[in-house]
């Protein structure tokens, strides 16, 4: 797997594609469907990306950026195979991946200065605490963090944080988290949980992480997520995620699509078995009316966004 995310023109984002999958995405650039691809690191890094689009039949414009505006370059490439070689090398961070191509600096004009935040100590602390909590939960993208930072202190007509200031703040805290998680070794508990959910999904149990904002919304929407052969479901919503990130364990909500207590209990037993099979512990008394709790849980979810 390549440690990248690929955005396509048509709605869609693929994370950790293989080299073969990346090659297939490049080859389907035909001017009639997807015309461009944007590649980002996993986790995403501000102002670090590569992108390509087809100008004409078999002729592509390729760009890459590695930090500030003075590190943004472009080139024209003939043939999809040359594009595939360059993007695969970029994704693998191979030395010399960009050699053999004639690159030109791309002048995007001066970068506007962003004024510092005009907040008192309490407001600044409250804002940063809220953004860090979203980071700890682990599901927000950089764009979502910036939007949250911009809106968090809005009151009436007062908007103390501009969009640009929000982006600067979100990116700073994002990079702090990226540096922190670089020291994590091995598989984390959220990754074990994802393995369990993947196994449940494969076994006919609709499994969703960080699904909706609350239990009411989750119960209302989970039915639409299930396939025709799904027997039941398991999910946790964003409030459950926040509780896990705060060190209180994770509540799993589950049930059978036929609404019977027998099916619900059976689904609960499958959930417990799958979660414990990946090395996590659960608390549940087999009562179909009670949630399953995964505890203890070290919630260190690696950023992807």
Image (cartoon, rainbow, N blue to C red):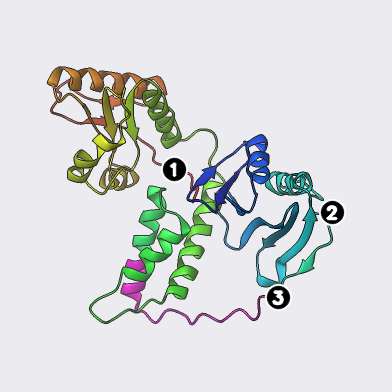
Q: Is residue 189 above or below residue 288?
A: below
Q: Which residue extends farthest right?
A: 100
Q: Give yes or no for contact between labels 1 and 3 (Cβ–Cβ under 8 Å).
A: no
In magenta segment, residue 168: no
Which one is in front, 214 or 33? Answer: 33
Dot 3 corresponds to which residue? 107
Distance between mark 1 and mark 3 Cα atoms:
37 Å
Q: Would you say residue 294 is visible in this rendering?
A: no
Q: Earlier in the sequence, mark 1 or mark 3?
A: 3
Please identify, in this view, whether the residue under mark 1 or under mark 3 is nearer the observer: 3
Dot 1 corresponds to which residue? 301
Q: Earlier in the sequence, mark 1 or mark 2?
A: 2
Q: Is residue 269 above or below residue 60?
A: above
Residue at 28% from the left image edge and 41% from the top image edge:
248
Distance between mark 1 and mark 2 Cα atoms:
36 Å
From the viewer's perspective, tell me whether residue 122 is left or right of residue 170.
Answer: left
Q: Position of residue 68 (x, y in %)?
A: 65, 69
Dot 2 corresponds to which residue? 99
Q: Which mark identifies residue 88?
A: none
Which one is in front, 189 or 10? Answer: 10
In magenta segment, residue 125: yes
- Badge 3: residue crowd in 10 Å (few <14, some 14–19, many ≥20): few
Q: Would you say residue 51 is visible in this rendering?
A: yes
Q: Position of residue 47 (x, y in %)?
A: 60, 63
* Residue bounds of the magenta highlight: 108-127
From the viewer's perspective, tell me whether residue 154 is left or right of residue 98.
Answer: left
From the viewer's perspective, tell me whether residue 286 is left or right of residue 40.
Answer: left
- Badge 2: residue crowd in 10 Å (few <14, some 14–19, many ≥20): few
Residue at 23% from the left image edge and 79% from the top image edge:
156
Q: Position of residue 245 (x, y in %)?
A: 34, 46
């Amino acid at each position: 797997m390549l440690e990248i995310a690929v955005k396509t023109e048509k709605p869609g984002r693929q994370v950790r594609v293989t080299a073969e999958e990346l090659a297939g995405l490049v080859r389907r650039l035909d001017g009639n469907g997807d015309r461009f691809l944007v590649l980002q690191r996993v986790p995403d890094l501000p102002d670090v990306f590569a992108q390509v689009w087809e100008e004409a039949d078999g002729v592509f414009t390729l760009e890459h950026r590695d930090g500030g505006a003075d590190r943004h370059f472009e080139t024209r490439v003939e043939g999809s195979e040359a594009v595939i070689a360059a993007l695969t090398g970029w994704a693998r961070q191979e030395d010399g991946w960009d050699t053999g191509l004639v690159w030109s600096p791309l002048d995007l004009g001066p970068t506007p200065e962003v004024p510092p935040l005009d907040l008192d100590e309490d407001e600044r602390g409250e804002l940063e605490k809220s953004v860090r909590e979203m980071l700890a939960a682990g599901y927000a993208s950089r764009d979502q963090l910036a939007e949250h930072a911009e809106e968090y202190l809005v009151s009436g007509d007062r908007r103390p944080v501009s969009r640009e200031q929000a982006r600067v703040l979100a990116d700073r805290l994002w990079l702090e988290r990226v540096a922190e998680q670089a020291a994590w070794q091995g598989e984390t508990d959220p990754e074990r949980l994802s393995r369990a959910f993947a196994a449940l999904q494969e076994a006919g149990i609709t499994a969703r992480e960080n699904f909706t904002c609350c239990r009411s919304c989750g119960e209302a929407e989970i039915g639409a997520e299930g396939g025709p052969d799904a027997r039941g479901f398991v999910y946790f919503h964003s409030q459950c995620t926040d509780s896990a990130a705060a060190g209180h364990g994770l509540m799993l909500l589950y049930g059978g699509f036929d609404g019977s207590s027998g099916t619900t209990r059976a689904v609960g037993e499958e959930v417990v078995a799958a979660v414990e099979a990946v090395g996590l512990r659960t608390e549940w008394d087999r009562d179909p009316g009670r949630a399953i709790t995964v505890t203890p849980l070290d919630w260190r979810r690696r950023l992807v966004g």
